[in-house]
Image: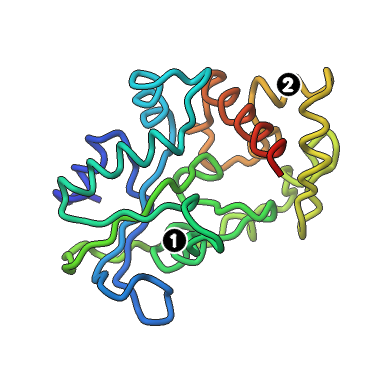
Amino acid sequence: MEHPILNAIRRAAFTPLGWFQPAPEDGVPEDARFVILIGNAGPDMFRRFARERDPSRDAMDDWTRDAVTRLAGDLDARAVYPFEMEPPWPFLRWARRGGAGHVSPLGLNIHPIYGLWHAYRAALLFPVEFDIPAQEPGAHPCQSCPVKPCLTACPVSAFDGSRYDVPVCAEHLKMPQGEECMSRGCLARHACPVGQGFAYAPAQAKFHMRAFLAARQKV
């Protein structure tokens, strides 16, 4: 989809993942007339992060807030983030509204293009509406997937189709047997055939897995 606002988001190395005109039941701040969900899909955003910060010690949330605040200012928008409040903003509900995909058996959003290899980093809230055609999520790819390899690829069976056993996953990553998951990223994600071309490169995968473990240690 081409549009000046969407192109500006892409030039900042973020991916526009979905958009919608909010209704009262969406839980969007009342002054917003249009919402665009942005994040990473593929390597572009991580490459910019790695140029501007040190991935070995800097947090992506801090960089995201700085980078998106500047982008929002350039676009006359306000930004809200999935990590800024408790309870968090309902980004997955907004993804449904924005035509950005479906809920996968892993509980993650599966995007029609990017598969499981994307993440929401912010929502841009605009005080005006835009003439961007609504995005359609298409047919749910998991419903036509007969094998569902994502549910059997995890070496410690952390996924069963209804829940994600976070402690079991985290403990596995700390063990020598978890090195493949730490270096490549989640094997359940890799097993999904959708969006394989956007799978994270090793440096990006390792960064996110280390960040996941660090967050678990704070729980």
Which residue in the structure is indicated by mark 1? 137
Which residue appears farthest toward the bottom when viewing the image?
Answer: 24
Picture coordinates of residue 137 (x, y %)? 44, 61
Residue displayed at 25% across by 51% down: 1
**Front disc: 2 or 1:** 2
Secondary structure beneath dot 1 equals: loop
Residue drawn at (47%, 25%) of the image: 58
Q: How dense is the environment of label 2, judged by Cα within 10 Å: few (below 14), some, or many (20 and up)?
A: few
Q: Quadrant of residue 206?
A: top right
On the image, which quarter does residue 26 sit in? bottom left
Q: Of the residues shown, which amino acid type is indicated by label 1? A: Pro
Quarter of the image with the C terminus is top right
Q: Position of residue 150 (x, y in %)?
A: 71, 44
Residue 210, disc: none
Q: Earlier in the sequence, mark 2 or mark 1?
A: 1
Q: Amino acid at mark 2?
A: Glu
- Location of mark 2 (residue): 180
Marks 1 and 2: in contact by CB < 8 Å? no
Q: Say how many tags the image has.
A: 2
Q: Is residue 203 left or right of residue 165?
A: left
Which residue is rendered at x = 36% and y = 42% of the image? Answer: 65
Q: Position of residue 98 (x, y in %)?
A: 39, 63
Q: Secondary structure at mark 2?
A: helix
Give the x, y percent position of residue 35.
Answer: 30, 63
Q: Is residue 87 above or below residue 209?
A: below
Question: Which one is nearer the viewer's eye here, 124 or 3?
Answer: 124
Q: Residue at x 16, y 50 (%)?
A: 75
